Amino acid sequence: MKLLEYEAKKILAGSGIPTPASFIVSPKTKPEFLPCVVKSQVPTGGRGKAGGIAIVQSPAEFAASSNKISELPIKGFLPKTLLAEELLLIKRELYLSLLIDKTAAQIVLMAHTNGGVEVEENRADEFLQLPLSGFDADTVGEQLAEYYDLPDTSFVLQDIVENLYTCFINNDATLLEINPLVLTTDGKLIAGDCKMELDDAAAFRHTDWNFEEKSAEVNFVTLNELGTVATIANGAGLAMATVDAVADAGMVPANFLDIGGGANEASVLAAFERIMRYPNVNVIIVNIFAGITRCDEVARAIIGAKKQIPHLPPLFIRLAGTNFEQAATLLSAEAIPTLGALDECIAAAKESQS
C-alpha cells in the first residue's frame, strides 16, 4: 500500500523526523502562512514536472494554484487532497531511504549526495548502502555525515537514522524514502518529500490505518511491469484463467488480480487506480463471475473509473452472476459495452492492439 505524501509525513513527524510546517488544503481554505508550496497528493511521481507543485506568495496565488492543481490529473490520478507546506530555503538536496533486501533478508539504508528530482539519473553503484541488521545508530550517523560531507550533522543524523528505523519497523513498512532530505540554509535537516509503502498483509496489526488508498482485500501480483494487458477478475482460478488466456493469445499480461469474493465498488475502483501505474497498459480485461461479489458494484466502479481516470485504456468487460441485470442497465446508460464471454474479450482486446 502506497501512502500519499501527507500521510507519510504525518507518520514521520510522529516518529521524531523533522518535517516542514504544513496544512491540508480544502476548497475554502485560507493559507495559514505565506509563502508556501502547494502540492498535489497523488500516488505517483513526476508531480513537479506535470504542474502539480506550485510556490505561492499571496492569497490570490494560493487560491488560483490550489484550484488549478485540484483539477489537474497526473498520470491518470486526480488528487482528492492538496498539501501546503512552508517554503524551505534549500542549501543542498540529499537522498536517504530504508528498504528491504529480500535476498539478504534485512533492512538496508541507501543514501546519495545528490537528491531531488534528478535522483534517478544517479548510477546504482554510486549509492551508499549500509545493512542495518544489528546496526549501531552512532556509527551509521557518523558514516552518513562523512559521506554527505556534513561533519557537524553527525548527532542529528544518528537521531534521524534511529527514528527512521523504528518508524520502519513499527509501521510494517517495505519502503521509506526521503527525497529530498533538505539541508536548509540555516543548517537544519528536514524531510522535504517522503514516499512510504506499507505491507498490506500486516493490516490486521494496524486497526488505526485509515489512508486514502485503503488496503483492499485483493490478491495483486505484478507479472510484467511493461505488460500491455491488465486483468481484473474475482476468484484465484478465474484470475489465473484470464491471465493464461491473455498469454495464449500472444499478448503480454501485466498483472494477476483477484479482487476476492466480497469486492465492493471502492475496492474495484482501487484496483483500476493501481493498474494505471503500469506505463504500457493499453487494454484492461474485466472478467467477473459474481457470487458474493455483485455485478452492480463492479459496474459502478467501472463507471467511476471512466469518470475519474482520464486516460483509462479501453475496457473489455464480461460480467455474469449476481445482479447482472442491474449492472447491464447501469453500464448501458453510460454507453459502456459488455461482452458475453472471456474469449470475446480476448479477441476484441487483441484486435484493438493490432
Image (cartoon, rainbow, N blue to C red):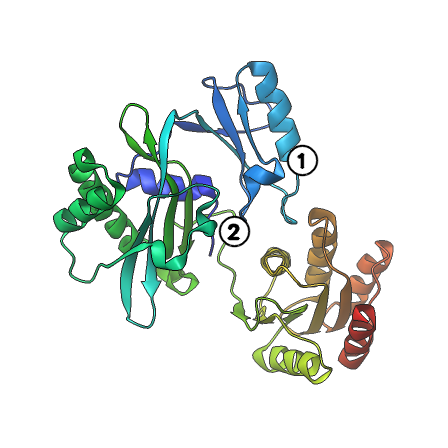
Q: Nearer the viewer, mark 1 or mark 2?
A: 1
Instruction: Count neighbours of disc 1 (C-alpha within 10 A) and say few if under 14, some if 14 to 19, many if 20 or more.
Output: few
Image-based side of 319 in relation to 20, left or right: right
Instruction: Locate the C terminus by quadrant.
Output: bottom right
Taking 95 as reference, is 333 above or below it? below
Where is mark 1, residue-wise? 71
- Which amino acid type is shown beneath numbered disc 1? Glu
Separation of marks 1 and 2 at Cα, in angstroms: 19 Å
Closer-to-camera residue (65/114): 114
Residue projecting furthest to the bottom: 248
Dot 1 falls on a residue whose secondary structure is loop
Percent of width and height locating residue 185: 32, 24
Q: Is residue 80 visible?
A: no
Residue that mark 2 sits on: 213
Q: Which element type, helix, strand or loop, lies under badge 2?
A: loop
**Relative to 260, residue 43 above or below:** above
